[in-house]
Amino acid sequence: MGAPQNGCGPATLIMTRWPVLEVVSVQVAPNRMPYVWTTVPSGQGLYMPANPPVGLYGSVAPTAAAEGGQGILVSSEYVNWTYGRNGLAIQVQYINGWPHCGLTSAVMASESELQVDDCTGWAITSPLTGTTGATGTVYDAGSQEVIQVTAASVTQGPGTLTLASPLQNGHAAGVMVSTLPQSVVWAAILLSAAQALTRGATSTTVLQAPGGKSSGGSDRATSLAKQARDILAPFARII
Protein backbone atom coordinates (compact mmCIF):
# COMPACT_ATOMS: atom_id res chain seq x y z
CA MET A 1 0.00 0.00 0.00
CA GLY A 2 1.11 3.58 -0.36
CA ALA A 3 -0.09 6.89 1.07
CA PRO A 4 2.88 9.20 1.75
CA GLN A 5 1.28 10.94 4.71
CA ASN A 6 -2.01 11.58 6.40
CA GLY A 7 -4.38 13.68 4.35
CA CYS A 8 -2.79 12.78 1.02
CA GLY A 9 -4.29 10.71 -1.78
CA PRO A 10 -5.84 7.30 -1.25
CA ALA A 11 -3.76 4.24 -0.44
CA THR A 12 -3.42 1.55 -3.09
CA LEU A 13 -3.84 -2.05 -1.99
CA ILE A 14 -2.41 -4.62 -4.42
CA MET A 15 -4.51 -7.77 -4.58
CA THR A 16 -3.34 -11.21 -5.70
CA ARG A 17 -6.12 -11.72 -8.27
CA TRP A 18 -7.35 -9.60 -11.15
CA PRO A 19 -9.16 -7.90 -12.70
CA VAL A 20 -10.84 -6.44 -9.63
CA LEU A 21 -14.50 -5.90 -10.55
CA GLU A 22 -16.01 -4.77 -7.27
CA VAL A 23 -14.91 -4.15 -3.69
CA VAL A 24 -17.39 -5.74 -1.28
CA SER A 25 -15.91 -4.63 2.05
CA VAL A 26 -12.76 -3.26 3.67
CA GLN A 27 -11.74 -3.58 7.32
CA VAL A 28 -8.68 -2.11 9.05
CA ALA A 29 -7.10 -2.58 12.46
CA PRO A 30 -3.87 -1.66 14.27
CA ASN A 31 -1.42 -4.44 13.48
CA ARG A 32 -1.36 -6.00 16.92
CA MET A 33 -3.25 -9.01 18.21
CA PRO A 34 -6.01 -9.40 19.08
CA TYR A 35 -7.17 -7.31 16.12
CA VAL A 36 -9.91 -4.76 16.72
CA TRP A 37 -11.44 -4.26 13.28
CA THR A 38 -12.98 -1.06 11.97
CA THR A 39 -15.21 -1.41 8.92
CA VAL A 40 -14.77 1.25 6.24
CA PRO A 41 -18.30 2.52 5.47
CA SER A 42 -19.71 1.38 2.14
CA GLY A 43 -21.57 3.53 -0.35
CA GLN A 44 -19.58 6.66 0.46
CA GLY A 45 -16.85 6.44 -2.16
CA LEU A 46 -14.19 5.52 0.41
CA TYR A 47 -12.92 2.54 -1.61
CA MET A 48 -13.09 1.33 -5.22
CA PRO A 49 -11.12 -0.64 -7.84
CA ALA A 50 -8.10 1.35 -8.99
CA ASN A 51 -8.49 0.31 -12.64
CA PRO A 52 -11.94 -1.13 -13.37
CA PRO A 53 -12.23 -2.94 -16.73
CA VAL A 54 -13.79 -0.33 -19.02
CA GLY A 55 -15.10 -2.58 -21.79
CA LEU A 56 -16.81 -5.11 -19.54
CA TYR A 57 -19.65 -2.98 -18.17
CA GLY A 58 -21.62 -0.38 -20.10
CA SER A 59 -20.34 -1.66 -23.44
CA VAL A 60 -22.24 -2.99 -26.47
CA ALA A 61 -19.40 -5.31 -27.51
CA PRO A 62 -17.36 -7.81 -25.47
CA THR A 63 -13.82 -6.72 -24.76
CA ALA A 64 -10.84 -8.32 -26.47
CA ALA A 65 -8.18 -6.66 -24.32
CA ALA A 66 -6.33 -7.58 -21.13
CA GLU A 67 -7.82 -4.61 -19.31
CA GLY A 68 -8.49 -4.08 -15.63
CA GLY A 69 -6.15 -4.00 -12.65
CA GLN A 70 -5.39 -5.67 -9.35
CA GLY A 71 -5.33 -2.54 -7.20
CA ILE A 72 -7.93 -1.18 -4.78
CA LEU A 73 -8.03 2.45 -3.65
CA VAL A 74 -8.91 3.17 0.00
CA SER A 75 -9.36 6.60 1.55
CA SER A 76 -6.36 7.87 3.53
CA GLU A 77 -8.80 8.52 6.36
CA TYR A 78 -8.59 4.78 7.07
CA VAL A 79 -5.27 3.66 5.56
CA ASN A 80 -2.36 5.95 6.40
CA TRP A 81 0.92 6.16 8.30
CA THR A 82 -0.59 6.81 11.75
CA TYR A 83 0.81 3.54 13.12
CA GLY A 84 4.03 3.61 11.07
CA ARG A 85 5.35 1.05 8.60
CA ASN A 86 3.44 -2.24 8.71
CA GLY A 87 1.26 -0.64 11.37
CA LEU A 88 -2.08 -1.70 9.88
CA ALA A 89 -3.77 -5.04 9.28
CA ILE A 90 -6.24 -4.88 6.40
CA GLN A 91 -8.96 -7.29 5.30
CA VAL A 92 -10.55 -6.87 1.88
CA GLN A 93 -13.37 -8.80 0.25
CA TYR A 94 -13.65 -8.30 -3.49
CA ILE A 95 -14.93 -9.83 -6.72
CA ASN A 96 -12.46 -10.47 -9.51
CA GLY A 97 -12.17 -12.16 -12.87
CA TRP A 98 -14.38 -12.24 -15.94
CA PRO A 99 -18.00 -13.34 -15.42
CA HIS A 100 -18.35 -16.83 -16.88
CA CYS A 101 -21.13 -19.41 -16.70
CA GLY A 102 -23.15 -22.06 -18.52
CA LEU A 103 -26.85 -22.42 -19.21
CA THR A 104 -28.58 -24.80 -16.80
CA SER A 105 -31.69 -25.08 -18.96
CA ALA A 106 -32.59 -24.54 -22.59
CA VAL A 107 -33.81 -21.12 -23.67
CA MET A 108 -35.91 -20.10 -26.65
CA ALA A 109 -35.37 -17.20 -29.04
CA SER A 110 -37.14 -14.00 -27.91
CA GLU A 111 -36.68 -14.82 -24.21
CA SER A 112 -35.01 -12.24 -21.95
CA GLU A 113 -33.81 -14.40 -19.08
CA LEU A 114 -31.10 -17.03 -18.77
CA GLN A 115 -30.89 -19.75 -16.13
CA VAL A 116 -27.16 -20.12 -15.40
CA ASP A 117 -24.86 -21.97 -13.01
CA ASP A 118 -23.03 -18.87 -11.74
CA CYS A 119 -24.21 -15.23 -11.55
CA THR A 120 -20.96 -13.92 -10.03
CA GLY A 121 -19.92 -10.57 -11.49
CA TRP A 122 -22.68 -10.33 -14.09
CA ALA A 123 -24.75 -7.58 -12.43
CA ILE A 124 -22.05 -5.32 -10.97
CA THR A 125 -22.44 -1.54 -11.31
CA SER A 126 -19.36 0.05 -12.83
CA PRO A 127 -17.84 2.85 -10.70
CA LEU A 128 -16.74 4.56 -13.93
CA THR A 129 -19.85 4.42 -16.13
CA GLY A 130 -22.52 3.95 -13.46
CA THR A 131 -24.15 1.25 -15.58
CA THR A 132 -25.12 -2.17 -14.27
CA GLY A 133 -24.53 -5.45 -16.06
CA ALA A 134 -21.78 -7.06 -18.08
CA THR A 135 -21.62 -7.68 -21.82
CA GLY A 136 -20.78 -11.22 -22.87
CA THR A 137 -21.06 -13.80 -25.61
CA VAL A 138 -23.24 -16.90 -25.91
CA TYR A 139 -20.85 -19.38 -27.56
CA ASP A 140 -23.18 -21.61 -29.58
CA ALA A 141 -21.67 -22.38 -33.00
CA GLY A 142 -23.86 -20.83 -35.72
CA SER A 143 -26.19 -19.33 -33.11
CA GLN A 144 -23.51 -17.32 -31.31
CA GLU A 145 -24.68 -13.91 -30.11
CA VAL A 146 -23.78 -11.03 -27.79
CA ILE A 147 -25.85 -10.33 -24.68
CA GLN A 148 -26.03 -7.46 -22.20
CA VAL A 149 -27.07 -8.31 -18.64
CA THR A 150 -29.06 -5.80 -16.59
CA ALA A 151 -29.75 -7.79 -13.41
CA ALA A 152 -29.09 -11.07 -11.60
CA SER A 153 -31.30 -12.90 -9.13
CA VAL A 154 -28.34 -13.63 -6.83
CA THR A 155 -24.86 -12.16 -6.39
CA GLN A 156 -23.14 -15.53 -6.79
CA GLY A 157 -23.93 -19.12 -7.61
CA PRO A 158 -26.81 -20.49 -9.72
CA GLY A 159 -29.56 -18.05 -10.64
CA THR A 160 -31.25 -16.00 -13.33
CA LEU A 161 -29.68 -13.32 -15.53
CA THR A 162 -32.00 -10.67 -16.98
CA LEU A 163 -31.03 -9.37 -20.43
CA ALA A 164 -31.31 -5.88 -21.90
CA SER A 165 -32.95 -7.27 -25.06
CA PRO A 166 -34.50 -10.60 -26.14
CA LEU A 167 -32.35 -13.38 -27.52
CA GLN A 168 -32.07 -13.74 -31.28
CA ASN A 169 -31.57 -17.51 -31.11
CA GLY A 170 -32.50 -20.46 -28.98
CA HIS A 171 -29.78 -22.25 -26.97
CA ALA A 172 -29.51 -25.64 -25.30
CA ALA A 173 -28.56 -26.36 -21.70
CA GLY A 174 -24.80 -26.48 -21.18
CA VAL A 175 -23.97 -23.72 -23.67
CA MET A 176 -21.17 -21.44 -22.44
CA VAL A 177 -21.87 -17.76 -21.72
CA SER A 178 -18.76 -15.72 -21.00
CA THR A 179 -17.15 -12.30 -20.85
CA LEU A 180 -13.65 -13.71 -21.26
CA PRO A 181 -11.72 -11.61 -23.81
CA GLN A 182 -11.90 -13.10 -27.29
CA SER A 183 -8.11 -13.41 -27.37
CA VAL A 184 -8.19 -15.71 -24.33
CA VAL A 185 -10.80 -17.92 -25.98
CA TRP A 186 -8.68 -18.15 -29.13
CA ALA A 187 -5.58 -18.99 -27.09
CA ALA A 188 -7.52 -21.81 -25.40
CA ILE A 189 -8.46 -23.18 -28.83
CA LEU A 190 -4.81 -23.10 -29.94
CA LEU A 191 -3.65 -24.86 -26.77
CA SER A 192 -6.35 -27.52 -27.21
CA ALA A 193 -5.20 -28.13 -30.77
CA ALA A 194 -1.58 -28.33 -29.62
CA GLN A 195 -2.55 -30.89 -26.98
CA ALA A 196 -4.39 -33.01 -29.54
CA LEU A 197 -1.40 -32.98 -31.88
CA THR A 198 1.00 -33.81 -29.06
CA ARG A 199 -1.07 -36.86 -28.18
CA GLY A 200 -1.01 -37.95 -31.82
CA ALA A 201 -4.74 -37.53 -32.42
CA THR A 202 -3.91 -35.74 -35.67
CA SER A 203 -0.51 -35.70 -37.35
CA THR A 204 0.64 -35.05 -40.90
CA THR A 205 3.98 -35.31 -42.65
CA VAL A 206 4.75 -33.53 -45.92
CA LEU A 207 7.61 -34.00 -48.37
CA GLN A 208 10.63 -31.73 -48.18
CA ALA A 209 10.14 -28.71 -50.45
CA PRO A 210 12.55 -25.90 -51.44
CA GLY A 211 12.42 -23.17 -48.83
CA GLY A 212 10.59 -25.37 -46.37
CA LYS A 213 11.10 -28.33 -44.11
CA SER A 214 9.33 -31.49 -43.17
CA SER A 215 7.02 -31.10 -40.24
CA GLY A 216 4.93 -33.39 -38.16
CA GLY A 217 2.38 -33.10 -35.40
CA SER A 218 4.95 -32.20 -32.71
CA ASP A 219 6.35 -29.26 -34.73
CA ARG A 220 2.89 -27.95 -35.40
CA ALA A 221 1.91 -28.40 -31.76
CA THR A 222 4.93 -26.40 -30.63
CA SER A 223 4.03 -23.60 -33.02
CA LEU A 224 0.42 -23.48 -31.84
CA ALA A 225 1.45 -23.47 -28.18
CA LYS A 226 3.87 -20.60 -28.82
CA GLN A 227 1.13 -18.59 -30.54
CA ALA A 228 -1.11 -19.15 -27.54
CA ARG A 229 1.59 -18.04 -25.09
CA ASP A 230 2.22 -14.89 -27.13
CA ILE A 231 -1.50 -14.06 -27.12
CA LEU A 232 -1.70 -14.55 -23.35
CA ALA A 233 1.46 -12.56 -22.56
CA PRO A 234 -0.43 -9.24 -21.98
CA PHE A 235 -2.53 -10.99 -19.32
CA ALA A 236 0.47 -11.84 -17.13
CA ARG A 237 0.67 -10.11 -13.76
CA ILE A 238 3.57 -10.04 -11.33
CA ILE A 239 2.84 -9.89 -7.60
Image: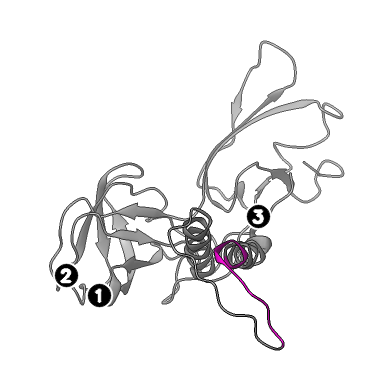
Q: Who is closer to the viewer here, 152 or 177?
A: 177
**In terms of sequence position, does the residue under pointer 2 or pointer 3 come before the other?**
3
Q: Which label was assigned to residue 143?
A: 1
Asked if residue 235 is positioned above or below residue 75 in the image, the reply reads: below
Point out the image quarter for the C terminus: top right
Percent x, y of residue 71: 67, 49
Q: Which residue is mark 2?
A: 170
Q: Amino acid at mark 3?
A: Ala
The residue under the point 33% across, 47% down is 118
Q: Amino acid at mark 2?
A: Gly
Percent x, y of residue 17: 60, 45
User: Crowdedness of circle 3 by 10 Å Cα count: few (<14), some, many (20+)?
Assistant: some
**In terms of sequence position, does the residue under pointer 3 or pointer 1 come before the other?**
3
Q: Which residues are magenta?
A: 211-220
Kindly state the secondary structure of the residue where label 3 is placed.
Answer: loop
Asked if residue 235 is positioned above or below residue 11 in the image, the reply reads: below
Do the CB atoms of the residues marked 3 and 1 lie less than 8 Å apart?
Answer: no
